[in-house]
Amino acid sequence: MISVSLTKYQILLKTVELGGITRAAEAMGYTQSAASRMIAALEQEWDIELLIRSRGGVHLSAAGEALLPSLRAVCNAQKELEEQVAHLHGLTQGTLRVGSFASVSIHWLPPIMKDFLAQYPGIRFELLSKWEFAEVEDLLRKGQADCGFLGLPAGEGLDVYPLCRDQFMAVLPPDHPLAHAPCYPMARLAEDPFIWIPEERDVEIGQIFQEEGVHPNLRYTVNDDFAILAMVEQGLGISIRPELVLEGSGHTFAAIPLERPRFRDIALAVRSGKALSPLTARFLEDVRRWCASQGLKPA
């Protein structure tokens, strides 16, 4: 009875997180109809409408909003219990929820997970990939992730463990006049067509423009790093991207440092005020070891 109820809670929370029952069902390995039935059963059991359904998706009712913190607390308590059981079993079982952003999810997590699972094959990973660091921070503060990769500085309520320093590079077409230059002069941004991601998702690049006092020739706005690299390859413009994004892209371009080098510091973070679980602590150790083995610049 308890485990079934917890599954209903988890389905409801995942529906709220992903904005739809179908996406929640896919993420948790259920059919859409099964997920819908569980939420409907929960609403009937409590005699409360929890979700408001519309053509645009679903969102919590006022009653659902009021119950949300308690639902999260129950599911987080279950997660902590599982971690304690896993510790007693010597990390032979358990689930680790990892928040991340795109380039770390693509370039770091697969080899890190492979190494970790070679040691602890019974551990399950739940990966929560977000576009923005603030979204990863939010997952941690709500207890929806055990740890998360993000950029520094981080907001309040988090303990951070710096991992490496990632340099911002000017990304140029291979035949650009400055393709082989030692650095990219910031004044040139007013001339070259610039391709960027919307400012609300690319705060760091906006900060570079502001601090340098430059007004780039903003020609194209896209929402994907790989689209940017494909456009640069075709000579449509230039961009500024972190070095980590450029790894293994399969596109042809030149990448040179900015005139005044700029960096972002990447860290692994956890929620403050809570002791690290044995599983999270071991994962942190392995992530640090992996970063060192790759020769990454320390933060």
Image (cartoon, rainbow, N blue to C red):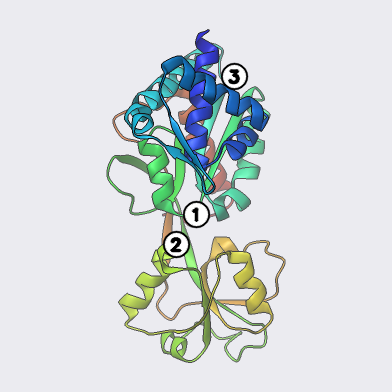
Which mark is on residue 201?
Answer: 2
User: 180 and 83: which one is in front?
Assistant: 83
- Give the quadrant of residue 138: top left
- Residue under label 3: 93
Extreme residue toward the top, this view: 1
Q: Where 176 sits versus 50, above or below?
A: below
Tag nearer the camera, 3 or 2: 2
Q: Where 279 sits versus 190, above or below?
A: above
Q: Is residue 145 at least partly visible in the picture?
A: no
Quarter of the rendering occupied by the C terminus: bottom left
Tag nearer the camera, 3 or 1: 1
For numbered disc 1, what is the local secondary structure? loop
Q: Residues within 10 Å of mark 3 (few under 14, many from 20)?
A: some
Q: Answer with left or right where residue 30 lies relative to residue 98.
A: right
User: Residue 66's x, y, as percent?
Assistant: 32, 29
Q: Answer with left or right where residue 59 lies relative to residue 103.
A: left
User: Residue 147's x, y, as percent?
Assistant: 45, 37
Q: Residues within 10 Å of mark 2 (few under 14, many from 20)?
A: some
- Residue under label 1: 131
Amino acid found under the numbered disc labelled 2 = Arg
Q: Answer with left or right where residue 294 lies relative to residue 240.
A: right
For numbered disc 3, what is the local secondary structure? loop
